[in-house]
Amino acid sequence: MVVMGRIVAPYGVFGWLKIVPDTEVLDGLFDYDTWWLGNGEDWREYQVETAKVHNDVLVVKLVGIDDRDAAFACKGKQIAVPREQLPKPDENEYYWSDLIGLNVKNQQDIDFGSIVDVFETGANDVLVIKKDGTPKNEEKLLPFIAAVVLEVDIEAKTMLVDWDEDF
């Protein structure tokens, strides 16, 4: 499964869901008629009944989620699609979900930790890197640009960066 967004809240009283997508374009999830809701290893398939863009989020009605209580039970779940349904990324392009968990080291072989999140700033994507056991305020934020990210090895789960340890 490749995570493509998350449910943040119910929308209305008839089972609609408010979705924050993690796709390149806001309505990228509309390319798929079937979505999987869940977390980790627990996923359940749903058919999309109706979906639309509403400001900077999506509002969606899924078959079988028919009231506010059912929608509220979905809050916090992730939305994913099976990897085989996604187009293959071009060279030097990656799905964000493939970057999560990669171990990051710099050219001096200093371990920065693992990628825990990726977000968009408008200018470029940003990697959030954290070592196990460190407080949230000790996360490193690195721009995901060619001048910084020198090598990505998805199979080895590693990333080499050109970044000073103290920055």
Image: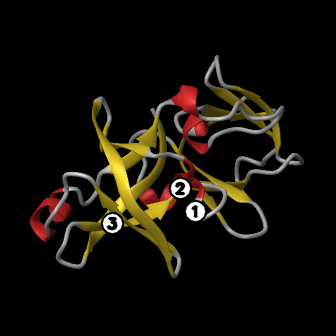
Q: For the residue labelled by badge 2, is the local secondary structure a helix, a strand or a loop? A: helix
Give the residue furthest to the left.
69
Q: Earlier in the sequence, mark 1 or mark 3?
A: 3
- Look at 47% across and 31% down and name the residue there: 82
Kind of residue sitting beneath label 3: Val
Between 92 and 166, the one nearer to me in the picture: 92
Residue farthest toward the top in the current orientation of the protein = 156
Classed neighbour count for the residue bearing mark 2: other residues with Cα under 10 Å, few (<14), some (14–19), many (≥20)? some
Query: Which quadrant is the N terminus positioned in?
Result: top left
Give yes or no for contact between labels 1 and 2 (Cβ–Cβ under 8 Å).
yes
For mark 3, what is the residue?
Answer: 8
**Tag shown at residue 30:** 2
Q: Which residue, given by chain and number where applicable, does mark 1 sit on?
A: 27
| Image position of 121 with respect to 133: above or below | below
Classify 10 Å Cα crowding around label 1: few (below 14), some (14-19), many (20 and above): some
What amino acid type should be assigned to the residue bearing mark 1?
Answer: Asp
At horizontal 82% and vertical 35% (from top left) the residue drawn is 92
Q: Regarding mark 1 in the picture, which secondary structure is present there?
A: loop
Q: Is residue 164 above or below residue 19?
A: above
Quarter residue 80 falls in: top left
